[in-house]
Amino acid sequence: MIVDGEKEGRALDETFDYVIVGSGAAGATAARVLSESGARIAVVEEGPAITTADFGDRLWPALRRLYRQMGTQVAYGRAIIPVLQGSCLGGSTVVNSAIVRRLPADVWQSWQVEHGLGEALPLEELHEYWDQIERELSTRPTPTDLWGHNNRLLAVAAQHVDAVGGPTRRNEWGCRGSARCSLGCPHGAKQSMLVSYLPYAAARGAVLLTSARVDKVILKGNRAVAVTGHFHRRQRRQAPFTLRARRGVLVAASAIQTPGLLARSGVRSRHLGRHFQGQPGVPLIGIFDEKVTLWSGATQGYEIDQQLTQGRFKIEAIALPPEALFPRLPGIGRSWLATIASSGYMTTWAVLLRAHAHGTVREGRFGARIRFDLTPQDMTNLRKGLRFTAELLFAAGAREILTGIYGLPERLTNPDEARLLEIGPNNPACYSPAMTHLFGTARMSIRASNGVVGPNFAVHGTSNLFVIDSSLFPTNLGINPQHTIMAIAMHAAKTIVGLTGGLGTQR
């Protein structure tokens, strides 16, 4: 059942066993687990209700309907970095590329050794959850017939320079290679939460509330007893709601929105909103003599990850809609139009950086206020990654590379010039990064003095206010996080059922 907040004109006051705030990877996975426990569940999503039929091939309607702040949310620092998040039923799983990567062993090892979380996040059990998720969501490497030329050229480059890479593993069933993951899959092939775990939970009685902003969690003593908020239509308030929780409130609002909600609810910790980490991505555009047609094939179908540990970066092929590609092209007037005329011959490959940087997320007048600055070591790693990417582009046959970096030549035209990227500007403002993988603003810790969330997923000092999203991650993953988020949310939900009394109220 969906309660569409855009159409609600009356106040709502209902009681559930569990209230889940957020319908993305974490919230939907928890709903999938809890819906089998016999509990009455509400899943509350700030963004609108959508269906596969709503997805088209134009960027602006997608930004307006599917993205937080229409894609204008940014992190402030020496560079202003767009921070892209989905804000709709299914969250960011609706607009990401469905990439599936298990948590790297070295990352989990640091969680165990440096943070003492080995028992709280047991690796063996996580692998069992990953096995289950991969079966249920049809995970497989991207088939070569879906690559498109953008991905195929990166595979060619990997062979030429003997780089370690391979097809991207994705959750999809029946992908047609339309390169429109970021606009919402028009065929329902991408196994986002919108078409998988949310319908599963709804079929078992979960109530999905959309266009419903949670303003705060109501605490009585150390117990979360309700959430309050309001329905809205295009940010205009419609009606208030109160959702009472018999057993617990699960916050899955993301590393950006979770700390603000906890702070508004009275949670006090010096770590709340701190330790914000992410993975900025910086693209290079290659121009080839052969037709590429960037907007055909899997959005992301091939990656090179040999520097994931030592260099802290990986390289991904990524398709961009024409409207997103054109603003990145250099020139003005006729020179810009001439460059656009070559767009059918362009590839876009990006360096995804596992940054050392820690930032902050605070409540601002107009939403979350994000601060984030790349460290000198991050800039060194980024420049190395960009040089390697340029070498790959030339190895694949690019005749020129559009750098998009202030202080460097607009175009590189021979392989010897790739070295310029490694000695390029040290100022992040000279680059054009964007960030989508976000962690750490309510991190898990054994002791309250070291974090916000305890090893049982409850906020320190509370008994049933739980956090289950990537804000609890103590470090940067270095990879696409959806798979890790889902496995940990699955583990968290099963832990929570045990902590809060097993089966919920039977309907």
Image: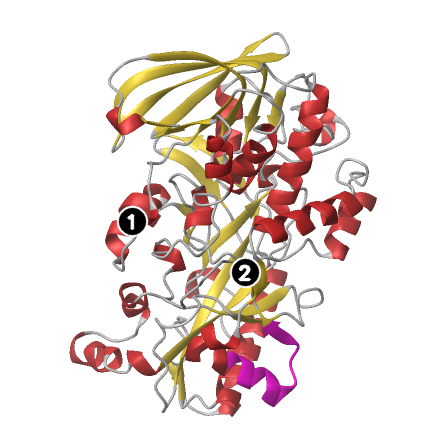
Left or right of 57, for residue 461: right
Residue 17 can be seen in this image: yes
Q: Is residue 160 magenta?
A: yes
Choose between 167 and 34: the one closer to the eye: 34
Which quarter of the figure has residue 30?
top right
What x and y, as percent, mark residue 127?
A: 73, 49
Does label 1 or label 2 sit earlier along the sequence? 1
Q: Position of residue 383 (x, y in %)?
A: 55, 71
How dense is the environment of label 1, judged by Cα within 10 Å: few (below 14), some, or many (20 and up)? few
What residue span does the magenta drawing correspond to?
154-166
Q: Amino acid at mark 2?
A: Arg
Is 133 or 83 nearer to us in this picture?
A: 133
Residue 353 locus on image (x, y percent): 57, 61
- Horizontal arrangement in the rendering, residue 127 relative to residue 119 (left or right): left
Q: Position of residue 108 (x, y in %)?
A: 75, 49
Secondary structure of the residue carrying numbered label 2? strand
Kind of element beneath mark 1: helix
Residue farthest to the left, as pictured: 334
